[in-house]
Image (spheres, rainbow, N blue to C red):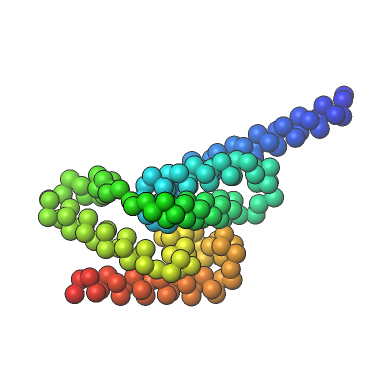
């Protein structure tokens, strides 16, 4: 038996497993990633661009996947960086977000008044999230849209667990205030 051939086959099998693992992760987390990137970038077009860039960056570094302890945190960290890059590029172009289609909202078959109220609440929430400090916004979006634990967020963002909890508490307080002001 040829040792070189066996080694090559083993490397190829590892690469296939890594590729499958990364593809499965993206298929499973795509809605969460897209939602997080949407709130980070401000519109669907930029969020999709950032998602595509995230996949490309992950794919280029797929050989590192075997060494990653928390694949979700690794992917979301790359997504956050891609989202920041896209947001910065959009800002430099002074691009404004296109109006979003409300067809994705839950309850779109409900009465027009209720749908209008949902749309207005979503717009107020979107505005309140955009007013958060970027550090608070990232933690909030990773927790809410990414459904990540505080520990996963700490790894993804590279900050202590206590800082994650503090940023989340501040974000929630500011969002409650903003939504209460709008309701009053």
**Residue 163: where, in percent of width, then height?**
54, 73
Task: Tell me which residue sits at (43%, 69%) in the image.
Answer: 133
54 vs 6, nearest the viewer:
54
Q: Is residue 144 left or right of residue 125?
A: right
121 vs 148, nearest the viewer:
121
Q: Is residue 29 left or right of residue 68?
A: left
Task: Tell me which residue sits at (47%, 72%) in the image.
Answer: 167
Q: Is residue 143 above or below residue 54?
A: below
Count all numbered tags in the image, as a single digit.
0
Task: Tell me which residue sits at (24%, 74%) in the image.
Answer: 181
Q: Residue 72: in sight, yes or no?
A: no
Quadrant occupied by the N terminus: top right
Q: Is residue 4 above or below residue 43?
A: above
Q: Residue 112: in sight, yes or no?
A: yes
Q: Is residue 106 left or right of residue 79?
A: left
Q: Is residue 67 left or right of residue 88?
A: right
**Residue 143: where, in percent of width, then height?**
45, 61
Q: Quadrant of residue 113?
A: bottom left
Task: Tell me which residue sits at (18%, 58%) in the image.
Answer: 117
Q: Which residue, as the protein is rendered here, is positioned at the far top? A: 1
**Residue 50: where, in percent of width, then height?**
47, 47
**Residue 129: where, in percent of width, then height?**
36, 64
């Amino acid at each position: 038996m040829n040792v070189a051939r066996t080694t090559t086959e083993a490397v190829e099998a590892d690469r296939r497993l890594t590729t499958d693992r990364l593809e499965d992760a993206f298929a499973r987390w795509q809605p969460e990633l897209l939602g997080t990137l949407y709130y980070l970038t401000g519109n669907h077009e930029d969020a999709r661009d950032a998602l595509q860039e995230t996949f490309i960056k992950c794919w280029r570094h797929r050989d590192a996947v075997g060494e990653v302890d928390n694949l979700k945190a690794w992917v979301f960290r790359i997504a956050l960086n891609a989202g920041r890059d896209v947001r910065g590029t959009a800002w430099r172009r002074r691009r404004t977000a296109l109006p979003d289609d409300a067809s994705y909202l839950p309850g779109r078959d409900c009465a027009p008044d209720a749908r209008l109220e949902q749309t207005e609440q979503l717009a107020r929430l979107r505005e309140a999230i955009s007013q958060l400090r970027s550090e608070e916004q990232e933690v909030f979006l990773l927790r809410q849209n990414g459904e990540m634990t505080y520990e996963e967020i700490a790894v993804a963002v590279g900050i202590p667990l206590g800082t994650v909890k503090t940023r989340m508490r501040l974000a929630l307080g500011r969002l409650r205030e903003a939504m209460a002001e709008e309701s009053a």
